[in-house]
Amino acid sequence: MLIRILLVCSALFTTAAFAEQDQSAAQLRKQLDAMTTLQGKFSQSLYDEKGEKLEESQGSFALQRPGKFYWKTEAPFPQLLVSNNKTIWLYDPDLETVNERPFTNDLQQTPALLLSEDIDKLRQNFTVTHKTVDKNIRFTLVPKVTDGLFQQLILVFAGDDLKEFHIQDSLGQSSQFMLSNVKRNQPLDASLFEFTPPPGVEILRN
């Protein structure tokens, strides 16, 4: 389902606030422009609205801007999310199903796109602020449209390297992703971003 695109211009924002937004967006663009591809390992922790840990998972990933990604959860439950910038596949080997849908610019529906999407589209859809914490640059992105799947995204960079990110969803749950063995701007095989459903699985098309 496509999210409505709302262009809101509010007099509540001061000139200083706009200046801060421009500076943060420009800094984020600088960070992401230095990252055409990204690959490595991840560990994810999911917390409920009270901060209690619900589950943990690990896997590997590869991203190529714009719009191509490979996100493989290996444990405890295998799952694969793939996009070639035209189609998005979600494969669940335990359920033997593949969800297939057209790629869209719906950043709210697929948070993984935030790391592979065009920065100008991010600025159009999100309020961006940043600060330095323990020598790391911490960017906070808040959707300008609030009826999507998540309410806040935090990206944490150590120098030019993305080291972690956090997503808070519309139900109050939050996910923390810690990245390791990260490699930037290394060639990636194009076949990584293509997916052919295994024989016998059920294909669900949206």
Image (cartoon, rainbow, N blue to C red):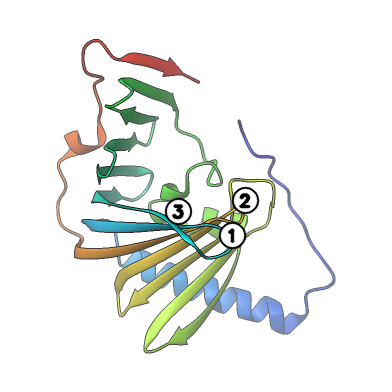
Tell me the distance, in whole angstroms, between the alpha carbons under discs 2 and 3: 20 Å
Could you tell me which residue is drawn at 50 percent across and 21 percent down? 206
Distance of mark 3 from mark 1, alpha carbons? 23 Å
**In this view, which residue lies farthest toward the right?**
11
Q: Are marks 3 and 1 in contact (CB under 8 Å)?
A: no
User: Dot 1 lies on which element?
Assistant: loop
Q: Residue at x 39, y 55 (%)?
A: 115
Q: Position of residue 205 (x, y in %)?
A: 45, 17
Could you say where residue 59 lies in the image, as x and y percent from the top left? 24, 50
- The residue under label 2 is 171
Distance CA(mark 2)–CA(mark 1): 8 Å
> Which numbered disc, 2 or 1, marks the residue closer to the eye?
1
Q: Earlier in the sequence, mark 2 or mark 3?
A: 3
The residue nearer to you, when weighing 64 against 167, is 167
Q: Which residue is mark 1?
A: 49
32 vs 72, left or right, is right
Considering every residue shown, the one lying at the far bottom of the view is 134
Mark 3 residue type: Leu
Q: Nearer the viewer, residue 95 or 162?
A: 95
- Residue type at mark 1: give it: Glu
Residue 56 lies left or right of residue 13; in this view the side is left
Q: Which residue is mark 3?
A: 114
